[in-house]
Amino acid sequence: MSEADRERWDARYGGAGLVMGAAPKAAVTALLAPHLAPARGGLALDVAAGEGQTGVFLAQAGLARVDLVDVSAVGLAKAQALADAAGVGARVRLHPHDLDAGLPGGLAPAYDVVTCLHFRPSPALAAQIAARVAPGGLLLRTALAAAHFAGKGDGPSPRFLAAPGELAADLGDAFEILALVEGAPDGPPDSQLLARRRA
Ligand SMILES: C[S@@+](CC[C@H](N)C(=O)[O-])C[C@H]1O[C@@H](n2cnc3c(N)ncnc32)[C@H](O)[C@@H]1O
C-alpha cells in the first residue's frame, strides 16, 4: 500500500464517531455467531480490522484474546476505545501493519476464529490468513463482489472486487464450507464465506 493510501484511511477514520458504525456486520451475526460456542475462551484474529466492531463482538462473545491487524493506527485507536467502552479492552491487541507485506510478526501460530471483512487480500495473503485457522477453527471472509458492480458505472475500484468463487478458491479439502454467499447483480453487494478447518 502506498503512504497515500494509509493517510487516506487515517483521514477517513479521523473524524468524530465511527465510520462503519458500532454494530457488527450481518455476516458476523447471521453466519458466524451461531458457530461460536466451541471457540469461547480461545483466540481470534481480525485482519483489516478497521474500527474493531468485529473484534469487540468476538471478545464479547467470549473469545479470550482478539488480535486486530490494520494499517490505520487511527482506526485501531478507535477499536481500542470501542473495546474499552464495551468492557473488553484488555482482551484486544492492536497490530498496526501494512498487509501488503503479509501478516505481521507477533501473532499466534493458530486461531480459533479468523475474520477478514470487506477487504480483498492478495492470493498470497489469503493463503496466509487461511493458514492461521486452527484445526476445527472458523474462517469468515467477505469482499465486495465484482458481479454486483459490473456495468454499474462509478463503483469501487476493480482492485477491491472479488471474482465469483474467489473467496473459496484454494481452500481445498482442508476446509468444510459452512456458508457461501455470492454477490450478484440484483443481489448482495458482497460475497461471504464461512468455513471450518477440518480437525
Ligand atoms: C472497507 S474497510 C473494512 C474494515 C473492517 N473490516 C470492517 O468490516 O468494518 C478496509 C480496511 O482495510 C484496511 N487496509 C486497507 N489496506 C490495507 C493494508 N495494505 N494493510 C492493512 N490494512 C489495510 C483499511 O485501513 C480499512 O480499515
Image (cartoon, rainbow, N blue to C red):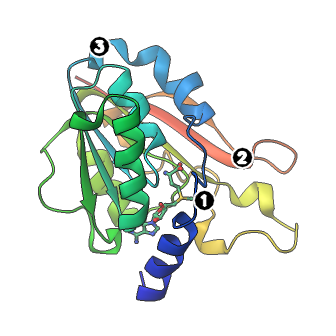
| Number of residues whose C-alpha sits closer than 10 Å to that of mark 2, classed few (under 14), some (14–19) or many (20 or more) | many
Q: Amino acid at mark 3?
A: Pro
User: In the image, residue 138 lies at what x, y percent?
Assistant: 35, 30
**Label pair 1/2, CB-CB below 8 angstroms:** yes
Indicate whether 176 appears above or below 157: above
**Measuring 46% from the left and 55% from the top, which residue is drawn there?**
50
Secondary structure at badge 2 equals: loop
Q: Amino acid at mark 2?
A: Gly
Left or right, 18 with respect to 6, comes to: right
Secondary structure at badge 3 equals: helix
Q: Which residue is mark 2?
A: 183
Of marks 3 and 2, which one's residue comes earlier in the chain?
3
User: In the image, residue 54 lies at what x, y percent?
Assistant: 45, 38
Q: Which numbered disc covers residue 162?
A: 1
Q: What whole-number distance in Å separates the C-alpha atoms at marks 1 and 2?
A: 9 Å
Q: Nearer the viewer, residue 54 or 141?
A: 54
Secondary structure at badge 1 equals: loop
Q: Nearer the viewer, residue 117 or 77?
A: 77
User: Mark 3 or mark 2, which is nearer to you?
Assistant: 3
Q: What whole-number distance in Å separates the C-alpha atoms at marks 3 and 1?
A: 30 Å
Q: Which numbered disc covers residue 38?
A: 3
